[in-house]
Amino acid sequence: MSDITTLAGLLELVRTRIEAGLHDRDAAARLPVLATRDAEGWPSARSMVLRDFDPGEWTLDIHSDADAAKVLQLTDAPRAAIQFWDAEVALQVRMRAHVVRLPHEEEKALWEEVPDDARARYGAVPPPGTPIAAHDAWHPNPRPARFAVLRARVLRVEALHLGETHRRARFEREEGWQGSWLVP
């Protein structure tokens, strides 16, 4: 584990735990919570599968059906919060991010990497969130046009490590990720 007594060490722990979410199905960062704001101004949170992370750029990618409410919410207001709790290392990570949908050409290239069984999630009829009469009153309809890749450009990371001595710090993109300690 990183030296969490230093700001650099705590940020490195966050980075390595996010990277673990890409390769380990049991890693906490595999299923972060993405929170947006709905049309009425209410928070709207859901667990998502982490699909990519660029540790140099601090960007995270998630996939969605293009007709899902979150895509519209992020088109209207591209601000989101992303959070995960990693019990294995007693670490809570909260991030602020600017989230945009990738251009269609980039999505098309990534569609080719989506396994066939997972493609059914993109194009359901009726679209996600539509009221239906029974739990099975919908059917999969894999359609590349309904595959959306959302890229979150992290602007702030706040890490809280709960150990013998609790530690909390905030790291800002605009400040070059230097970080500052906060009262836990």
Image (cartoon, rainbow, N blue to C red):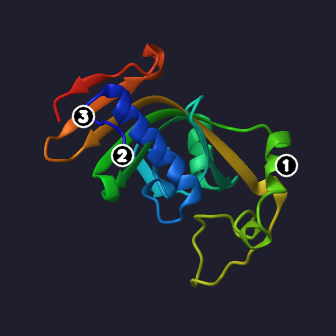
Question: Residue 12: which quarter of the image?
Answer: top left
Q: Which mark is residue 168?
A: 3
Horizontally, residue 183 falls left or right of residue 54, namely left
Q: If you read the primary sequence from the N terminus, does the residue marked by circle 3 or circle 2 appear first? A: 2
- Report crowding for label 3: few under 14, some 14 to 19, many 20 or more residues within 10 A (C-alpha): many
Q: What residue do we see at 47% from left, 16% from top?
A: 174
> Picture coordinates of residue 97 (x, y %)?
50, 33
Under circle 2, the secondary element is: loop
Residue 37 appears anywhere in the view = no
- Report crowding for label 1: few under 14, some 14 to 19, many 20 or more residues within 10 A (C-alpha): some
Horizontally, residue 79 falls left or right of residue 128, namely left
- Report crowding for label 2: few under 14, some 14 to 19, many 20 or more residues within 10 A (C-alpha): few
Q: What residue do we see at 52% from left, 54% from top?
A: 21
Residue tagged 1? 108
> Picture coordinates of residue 65 (x, y %)?
68, 57
Quadrant occupied by the C terminus: top left
The answer for how far apart the CA atoms under marks 1 and 2 are is: 38 Å
> Picture coordinates of residue 28 (x, y %)?
43, 57
Q: What residue do we see at 47% from left, 44% from top?
A: 16
Residue tagged 2? 1
Q: Is residue 75 above or below residue 120?
A: above
